[in-house]
Amino acid sequence: MRILYLFLYLFLNVGLRIFFKRVKTVNCKKGVGRTIFVCNHPAAFMDPLVVALYGGNAVHFMARADVFKPFLKPFFWAAHMLPIYRQLDGGDTQEKNKLVFVKTSEILRNNKNILIFGEGFTDEEFIRRLKPIKKGAFRIGFSALEAMNWEHKVFVTSVGCNYSSPNMARSELLISTGTPICLNDFRVDYEENSSRTIAALTKKLELDLINQITHVENVDYLEFHEQVMALTRKGMHPISYDPSYSLEQRHNYSKNLAIKLNEKTEDQLANIESLKNELNSYFSLLDSMGITENERFLHENKTWKISVRCLKMLLMFPIALLGLVHAGILYLLVKRFVEKKFKRPVFWGSTKLLLLLTFVGLCNIPVLFLIANYFSYLGSGSAYLIGISYYLFIWFYGLIAYIWKNDATYLYRYFKSRKLNLSSVNSMASKLIDSANSI
């Protein structure tokens, strides 16, 4: 493990544990080697960060070649990154990739792992759907086996990243790992017809990866899927969910709902088209009233818990004030910069996280010395220990400030919407929930 990779691992460990409220891993095995992990790519920069941190294994990343600018190559090398050339990059990509495969063969020979994002690119916005998987993982794997004269076992394993919302801080993440495919078992098939074997294994891997995530086949039903999850409060919706269900239960509900939709025939889909239209009308009505489905639910069930929320805000206020001073202004500047410069929303969450961690860390270095100077009468050792301790807690202060802001917004939304008459809307929601559950 190179030094920069180790530093980023420790640095991002702090950031991601602050960003995500809850992370669950399913079937993730630690300590494996000579494995090519093939992951879906729903959230741009966020995906390699979470797999490297929570997957349990050090990996070398395969990233698209166009980001490897000359001045960045040393940084990418130190961070375990290698280029992969795509046809849309132009030039003789096959020849260039042969040189890359020499490096990947060496990595696998040394009992290390590789991470590939099999779809090849990310959608403009986060959606719960898998695009066709490329064949690169198996080409790399079989090339390595040939270079090693088939002396060691090489595996390809699917990894599914399931976010409730990758751009929302304090959201949730479930990472599910599939069954490893041992390439050595297919030596005879590969030597007889390499293209056919790679194509068949790629299809097998794609099906296994689909089984690790929520995959809505028909793009016209992506929004419908989200709306049903919000109404039933059983799925991976980031806000409207029942906390009595575990994250794994909610992931399974989301996945199984998608499977039900995927299995329906054209005639069966036509039968639920009216429900789809009713849901669109219902959520448009909520938008026009200025409330969310979660707020409607809280109104109906009288579960806002305002007194608890106010007490929490009161207790957290001193720490939240520290977070505002050390990170609040930087957060607003980073948020404004990223949303203005990055036109693709799928990049927002990870880019904000990386920039905010960097700027909060750098801009607050003087605070360390100010605190140490203030306590200098205790001796330099004790003074700097206090300064460093305070500095390390700055990210925690920032988190408390963010939670306090969300609670303040929550109270504002409550007082703004509490006078609404929602009886007819609640009745409509009840009927729609029954219809949604019948799917």
Image (cartoon, rainbow, N blue to C red):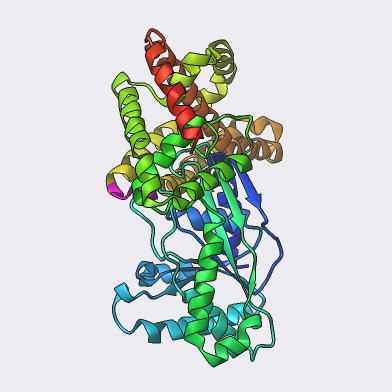
Q: Position of residue 22 (x, y in %)?
A: 60, 40
User: Left or right of 85: which side holds 215?
Assistant: right
Q: Position of residue 308 (x, y in %)?
A: 59, 14
Point 41% across, 16% down: residue: 412
Q: Which residues are magenta?
A: 341-346
Above-or-below relation of 256 to 152: above
Q: Is residue 422 visible?
A: no
Point 41% across, 49% down: residue: 127
Along the line of sight, which residue is nearer the eye, 336 or 319? Answer: 336
Above-or-below relation of 235 to 205: above
User: Left or right of 232: which side holds 372?
Assistant: right
Query: Total of numbered circles in the picture?
Result: 0
User: Left or right of 89: which side holds 364?
Assistant: right
Q: Is residue 5 visible?
A: yes
Q: Position of residue 217 (x, y in %)?
A: 41, 54
Where residue 151 sits, quadrant-wise, is bottom right
Q: Position of residue 212 (x, y in %)?
A: 57, 55
Q: Residue furthest top?
A: 419
Where residue 96 sits, quadrant-wise, is bottom left
Q: Is residue 425 covered in magenta?
A: no
